[in-house]
Image: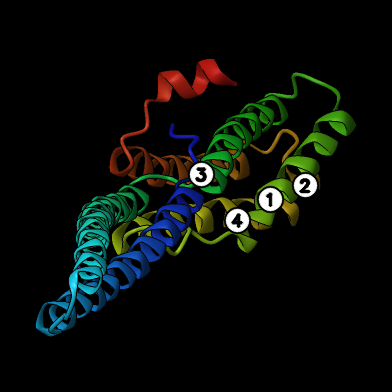
Amino acid sequence: MPNIDTELIYIIVLSIGCLTVIGVFYFLFRFISVKKQLKVLSNTKSKGKKAKRNKKRQKIVLDRKKRSVLTLFIVSLILSITLFSGTAYARYYQAMNLSKEDSESIVNSYYLIRDFEDQLKLLRDKKDDQTKLEQNIRQLSTSMASYGTKKANKLNSVDGQLVLNRYYNSVKQLGMNASTQTKNFYGNSELVNGFLKDIQSAKDYEGDVFRYYKVDKSVLIKGK
Protein backbone atom coordinates (compact mmCIF):
# COMPACT_ATOMS: atom_id res chain seq x y z
CA MET A 1 0.00 0.00 0.00
CA PRO A 2 1.35 3.45 -0.81
CA ASN A 3 2.62 5.34 2.20
CA ILE A 4 3.59 8.52 0.36
CA ASP A 5 1.77 11.66 1.46
CA THR A 6 0.62 12.48 -2.08
CA GLU A 7 -1.49 15.43 -0.96
CA LEU A 8 1.60 17.13 0.49
CA ILE A 9 3.61 16.39 -2.67
CA TYR A 10 0.79 17.82 -4.79
CA ILE A 11 0.69 21.05 -2.77
CA ILE A 12 4.49 21.47 -2.84
CA VAL A 13 4.78 20.88 -6.59
CA LEU A 14 1.84 23.18 -7.29
CA SER A 15 3.34 25.94 -5.14
CA ILE A 16 6.72 25.72 -6.88
CA GLY A 17 4.94 25.64 -10.24
CA CYS A 18 3.11 28.88 -9.40
CA LEU A 19 6.41 30.53 -8.46
CA THR A 20 7.97 29.50 -11.78
CA VAL A 21 4.99 30.99 -13.66
CA ILE A 22 5.62 34.28 -11.86
CA GLY A 23 9.26 33.95 -12.96
CA VAL A 24 8.18 33.39 -16.58
CA PHE A 25 6.20 36.63 -16.65
CA TYR A 26 8.91 38.53 -14.80
CA PHE A 27 11.68 37.51 -17.22
CA LEU A 28 9.40 38.11 -20.21
CA PHE A 29 8.74 41.62 -18.96
CA ARG A 30 12.48 42.17 -18.40
CA PHE A 31 13.28 40.88 -21.90
CA ILE A 32 10.77 43.25 -23.51
CA SER A 33 12.09 46.13 -21.41
CA VAL A 34 15.73 45.50 -22.37
CA LYS A 35 14.73 45.09 -26.02
CA LYS A 36 13.02 48.48 -25.93
CA GLN A 37 16.10 50.04 -24.36
CA LEU A 38 18.23 48.62 -27.16
CA LYS A 39 15.86 49.97 -29.75
CA VAL A 40 15.91 53.43 -28.19
CA LEU A 41 19.71 53.30 -27.96
CA SER A 42 20.02 52.24 -31.60
CA ASN A 43 17.82 55.13 -32.72
CA THR A 44 19.81 57.63 -30.68
CA LYS A 45 22.40 59.59 -32.68
CA SER A 46 25.75 60.05 -31.00
CA LYS A 47 28.09 62.91 -31.74
CA GLY A 48 31.73 62.63 -31.02
CA LYS A 49 33.99 59.64 -30.41
CA LYS A 50 33.39 59.53 -26.68
CA ALA A 51 29.60 59.45 -27.10
CA LYS A 52 29.92 56.74 -29.71
CA ARG A 53 32.15 54.67 -27.43
CA ASN A 54 29.66 55.05 -24.56
CA LYS A 55 26.82 54.04 -26.86
CA LYS A 56 28.76 50.98 -28.01
CA ARG A 57 29.50 49.95 -24.40
CA GLN A 58 25.87 50.41 -23.41
CA LYS A 59 24.78 48.34 -26.38
CA ILE A 60 27.17 45.51 -25.40
CA VAL A 61 25.86 45.59 -21.81
CA LEU A 62 22.24 45.56 -22.97
CA ASP A 63 22.92 42.77 -25.48
CA ARG A 64 24.41 40.63 -22.72
CA LYS A 65 21.52 41.44 -20.43
CA LYS A 66 19.03 40.57 -23.17
CA ARG A 67 20.66 37.18 -23.78
CA SER A 68 20.83 36.50 -20.03
CA VAL A 69 17.19 37.42 -19.46
CA LEU A 70 16.11 35.40 -22.52
CA THR A 71 17.96 32.36 -21.14
CA LEU A 72 16.29 32.77 -17.75
CA PHE A 73 12.90 33.16 -19.44
CA ILE A 74 13.36 29.94 -21.42
CA VAL A 75 14.59 28.03 -18.36
CA SER A 76 11.70 29.23 -16.19
CA LEU A 77 9.22 28.42 -18.98
CA ILE A 78 10.54 24.88 -19.36
CA LEU A 79 10.61 24.45 -15.58
CA SER A 80 7.03 25.67 -15.18
CA ILE A 81 5.80 23.33 -17.92
CA THR A 82 7.67 20.43 -16.29
CA LEU A 83 6.33 21.24 -12.83
CA PHE A 84 2.74 21.63 -13.96
CA SER A 85 3.03 18.32 -15.80
CA GLY A 86 4.27 16.88 -12.52
CA THR A 87 1.35 18.52 -10.71
CA ALA A 88 -1.10 16.93 -13.13
CA TYR A 89 0.51 13.53 -12.54
CA ALA A 90 0.53 14.05 -8.76
CA ARG A 91 -3.17 14.94 -8.92
CA TYR A 92 -3.89 11.81 -10.96
CA TYR A 93 -1.78 9.70 -8.58
CA GLN A 94 -3.67 11.10 -5.59
CA ALA A 95 -7.00 10.38 -7.27
CA MET A 96 -6.11 6.76 -7.96
CA ASN A 97 -4.20 5.85 -4.79
CA LEU A 98 -4.96 5.71 -1.10
CA SER A 99 -3.86 8.65 1.02
CA LYS A 100 -1.71 7.99 4.08
CA GLU A 101 -4.75 8.35 6.37
CA ASP A 102 -6.91 6.04 4.29
CA SER A 103 -4.10 3.49 4.08
CA GLU A 104 -3.83 3.39 7.87
CA SER A 105 -7.62 3.12 8.22
CA ILE A 106 -7.74 0.18 5.78
CA VAL A 107 -4.95 -1.67 7.58
CA ASN A 108 -6.57 -1.17 11.00
CA SER A 109 -10.03 -2.19 9.81
CA TYR A 110 -8.63 -5.29 8.10
CA TYR A 111 -7.45 -6.63 11.46
CA LEU A 112 -10.42 -5.30 13.43
CA ILE A 113 -12.87 -7.26 11.29
CA ARG A 114 -10.89 -10.48 11.51
CA ASP A 115 -10.35 -10.17 15.27
CA PHE A 116 -14.06 -9.50 15.66
CA GLU A 117 -14.86 -12.59 13.59
CA ASP A 118 -12.54 -14.78 15.68
CA GLN A 119 -14.03 -13.54 18.95
CA LEU A 120 -17.59 -14.15 17.72
CA LYS A 121 -16.77 -17.76 16.86
CA LEU A 122 -15.26 -18.28 20.31
CA LEU A 123 -18.42 -16.85 21.89
CA ARG A 124 -20.68 -19.01 19.73
CA ASP A 125 -18.78 -22.16 20.58
CA LYS A 126 -18.20 -21.16 24.26
CA LYS A 127 -14.46 -21.78 23.91
CA ASP A 128 -13.25 -19.14 26.36
CA ASP A 129 -14.35 -17.17 29.39
CA GLN A 130 -17.61 -15.34 28.66
CA THR A 131 -16.71 -12.14 30.51
CA LYS A 132 -13.34 -11.92 28.79
CA LEU A 133 -14.82 -12.52 25.33
CA GLU A 134 -17.61 -10.00 25.87
CA GLN A 135 -15.07 -7.40 26.95
CA ASN A 136 -13.05 -8.06 23.77
CA ILE A 137 -16.20 -7.73 21.64
CA ARG A 138 -17.07 -4.46 23.37
CA GLN A 139 -13.64 -2.99 22.61
CA LEU A 140 -13.68 -4.19 19.01
CA SER A 141 -17.20 -2.92 18.38
CA THR A 142 -16.27 0.51 19.75
CA SER A 143 -13.25 0.69 17.45
CA MET A 144 -15.33 -0.35 14.43
CA ALA A 145 -18.13 2.08 15.26
CA SER A 146 -15.57 4.91 15.19
CA TYR A 147 -15.34 4.42 11.43
CA GLY A 148 -18.52 6.47 11.22
CA THR A 149 -16.29 9.55 11.49
CA LYS A 150 -14.06 8.52 8.60
CA LYS A 151 -14.49 9.87 5.10
CA ALA A 152 -12.39 9.15 2.02
CA ASN A 153 -9.89 11.82 1.03
CA LYS A 154 -11.66 14.25 -1.30
CA LEU A 155 -8.67 14.37 -3.62
CA ASN A 156 -9.48 10.76 -4.54
CA SER A 157 -11.57 10.08 -7.63
CA VAL A 158 -15.36 10.11 -7.20
CA ASP A 159 -15.51 6.34 -7.70
CA GLY A 160 -12.64 5.84 -5.25
CA GLN A 161 -14.41 7.90 -2.59
CA LEU A 162 -17.61 5.92 -3.12
CA VAL A 163 -15.82 2.58 -2.71
CA LEU A 164 -14.00 3.71 0.43
CA ASN A 165 -16.98 5.39 2.10
CA ARG A 166 -19.16 2.36 1.45
CA TYR A 167 -16.55 0.18 3.14
CA TYR A 168 -16.13 2.57 6.09
CA ASN A 169 -19.90 2.60 6.56
CA SER A 170 -20.06 -1.22 6.61
CA VAL A 171 -17.37 -1.35 9.31
CA LYS A 172 -19.17 1.32 11.33
CA GLN A 173 -22.47 -0.54 11.04
CA LEU A 174 -20.87 -3.78 12.25
CA GLY A 175 -19.52 -2.01 15.30
CA MET A 176 -22.76 -0.23 16.15
CA ASN A 177 -24.85 -3.38 15.79
CA ALA A 178 -22.42 -5.46 17.84
CA SER A 179 -22.35 -2.91 20.65
CA THR A 180 -26.07 -3.52 21.27
CA GLN A 181 -25.68 -7.31 21.37
CA THR A 182 -22.55 -7.76 23.50
CA LYS A 183 -24.34 -9.80 26.18
CA ASN A 184 -26.27 -11.97 23.72
CA PHE A 185 -23.52 -13.65 21.69
CA TYR A 186 -22.41 -16.36 24.13
CA GLY A 187 -23.66 -19.71 22.87
CA ASN A 188 -26.08 -18.01 20.46
CA SER A 189 -25.34 -19.64 17.09
CA GLU A 190 -28.19 -17.92 15.25
CA LEU A 191 -27.13 -14.43 16.31
CA VAL A 192 -23.42 -15.04 15.69
CA ASN A 193 -24.04 -16.61 12.28
CA GLY A 194 -26.10 -13.58 11.31
CA PHE A 195 -23.16 -11.33 12.22
CA LEU A 196 -20.77 -13.58 10.32
CA LYS A 197 -22.85 -12.90 7.19
CA ASP A 198 -22.55 -9.17 7.88
CA ILE A 199 -18.80 -9.59 8.27
CA GLN A 200 -18.65 -11.28 4.89
CA SER A 201 -20.51 -8.33 3.36
CA ALA A 202 -17.93 -5.97 4.89
CA LYS A 203 -15.17 -8.17 3.47
CA ASP A 204 -16.80 -7.92 0.04
CA TYR A 205 -16.67 -4.11 0.26
CA GLU A 206 -13.09 -4.44 1.46
CA GLY A 207 -12.35 -6.52 -1.65
CA ASP A 208 -13.77 -3.71 -3.80
CA VAL A 209 -11.35 -1.28 -2.12
CA PHE A 210 -8.40 -3.64 -2.64
CA ARG A 211 -9.23 -4.14 -6.30
CA TYR A 212 -9.86 -0.47 -7.04
CA TYR A 213 -6.66 0.72 -5.37
CA LYS A 214 -4.68 -2.38 -6.38
CA VAL A 215 -3.79 -3.24 -2.77
CA ASP A 216 -1.55 -6.27 -2.34
CA LYS A 217 -3.12 -8.07 0.61
CA SER A 218 0.00 -10.22 1.16
CA VAL A 219 2.11 -7.09 1.67
CA LEU A 220 -0.51 -5.69 4.05
CA ILE A 221 -0.45 -8.85 6.17
CA LYS A 222 3.35 -8.97 6.28
CA GLY A 223 3.58 -5.30 7.17
CA LYS A 224 1.46 -5.61 10.30
Q: Are marks 3 and 2 in contact (CB under 8 Å)?
A: no
Q: Residue 104: where, in percent of width, then height?
A: 58, 39
Point 13% across, 79% down: residue: 39
Three-letter amino acid code of the residue under disc 2: Thr
Mark pair 4, 2: CA separation: 16 Å
Left or right side of 117 for 93: left
Residue 160 falls in which quadrant of the image? bottom left
Q: Are marks 3 and 1 in contact (CB under 8 Å)?
A: no
Residue matched to label 3: 5
Q: Earlier in the sequence, mark 4 or mark 2?
A: 4
Residue matched to label 2: 182
Report the front residue among 223 and 21. 21
Mark pair 3, 2: CA separation: 38 Å
Q: Are marks 1 and 4 in contact (CB under 8 Å)?
A: no
Mark 4 surroundings: few (<14), some (14-19) or many (≥20) residues within 10 A: many
Residue matched to label 1: 178
Disc 3 is placed on an element classified as loop
Mark pair 1, 4: CA separation: 10 Å
Mark 2 surroundings: few (<14), some (14-19) or many (≥20) residues within 10 A: some
Return the mark for residue 172. 4
Q: Are marks 2 and 1 in contact (CB under 8 Å)?
A: yes
Mark pair 3, 1: CA separation: 34 Å
Residue 107 falls in which quadrant of the image? top right
Mark 3 surroundings: few (<14), some (14-19) or many (≥20) residues within 10 A: few
